[in-house]
Image (tube, rainbow, N blue to C red):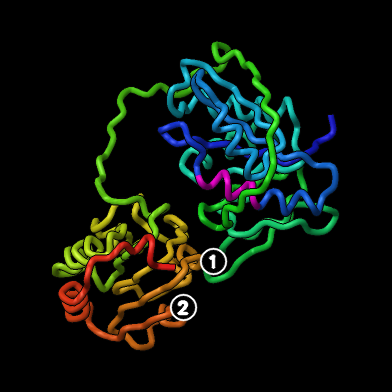
Amino acid sequence: MEPNGILIYGELTTENTVKPVVKQLLTKARELKEKIWNQRIVVCVIGPRMNYDSIIYELGRYGADDVVIVCDNRITEYNHNYHPDIFTKVAQKYPPRIILVGATVQGKEIASYTATKLNTGLTADCTGLNIGDKYLLLSTRPTFGGQLTADILCGTFPQMATVQENIFKEEPVEHTANAIFDWIDIDKIEKRIHVIKTIKKEFSGKDISSAKVVVAGGFGACKNNGFALIYQFAQKMQAAVGGSREAFEKGFILKSQQIGQTGKTIAPSLYVAVGISGANQHIVGIKNSGKIIAINSDKDAPIFKYADIGIVGDLFDVLPELIDKYDTVNIEENNE
């Protein structure tokens, strides 16, 4: 069978709803579809036996033509054995021209496994997608530590790419998806990995991936009570707290709070950078923010080139003033 169509991994949340990155990929896939004729957009969803009507509707609303659903009551959460193998089998049964996967923890494992099994190439952590010469997928990704970007043509089929979260916007359309309930015998899937114990690290803060307001600290905040002030200010702002790679490496934030090329890409309405210099590696993660406020003692810090509002000053002087003067409002509704 000739490769045809765009296949997307339909990653679900722990509550069995569609992850935002899937809707972002669908929005971009509609644009790619217009440049290569006679292509259908297919989303593969893997999960337990349940009612999938709302998921099918949601995926159709963002442009999916077909939703292939593989469900089994033993698949109650992500499984390192089942999910990569099932997705690969779906790609073999419905051979696509292009495979797109969100660059999440799940997505990276699934994409690398699938690429190996299908003997094809994979461009990872992309920040842009287009159709290039000979209707080949053109994938853009940061390189040289974020100093440059590289445009990579995929010459093997299927053409594969993982895409960072929040790179593309979600844009719904009037569209309906066709549901295909498929069956794969998971008893025949080789059990390569055995989970001995799962320890969930509790984090009571907001998720920076979906927060409307994010306050982040960098190297300049990694001393004294810098992050204590940031958390206090974020609470006033009803904001999520993030940070740079330096903040993660020094233990002030969790990996899930890291922003940038080696962390998360975010797109809040308002981003406040505290003590962050603004290296390219970090800018990659915040370039889709609505408004950017930068607080830094170095007037020549690169972050000011990207900021809508820049405050030159010591964060230990500036933040206490802002905390003292700030009146709590509903930022999520009023910050447009």
Q: Which residues are magenta?
A: 20-27
**Which mark, by number, is residue 306?**
2
Residue 122 visible? The answer is no
Q: CA distance from mark 2 to mark 1?
A: 21 Å
- Above/below status of 152 relative to 6: below
Q: Quadrant of residue 130?
A: bottom right
**Dot 1 corresponds to which residue?**
144
Q: Secondary structure at mark 2?
A: loop
**Residue 21 included in the magenta stretch of the image:** yes
Question: In x, y percent, where is residue 259?
Answer: 40, 60
Residue at left offset 72%, top offset 37%: 65
**Residue 167 included in the magenta stretch of the image:** no
Q: Amino acid at mark 2?
A: Tyr
Residue 284 visible? The answer is yes
137 displayed left or right of 112: right
Q: Amino acid at mark 1?
A: Phe
- Above/below status of 150 relative to 299: above
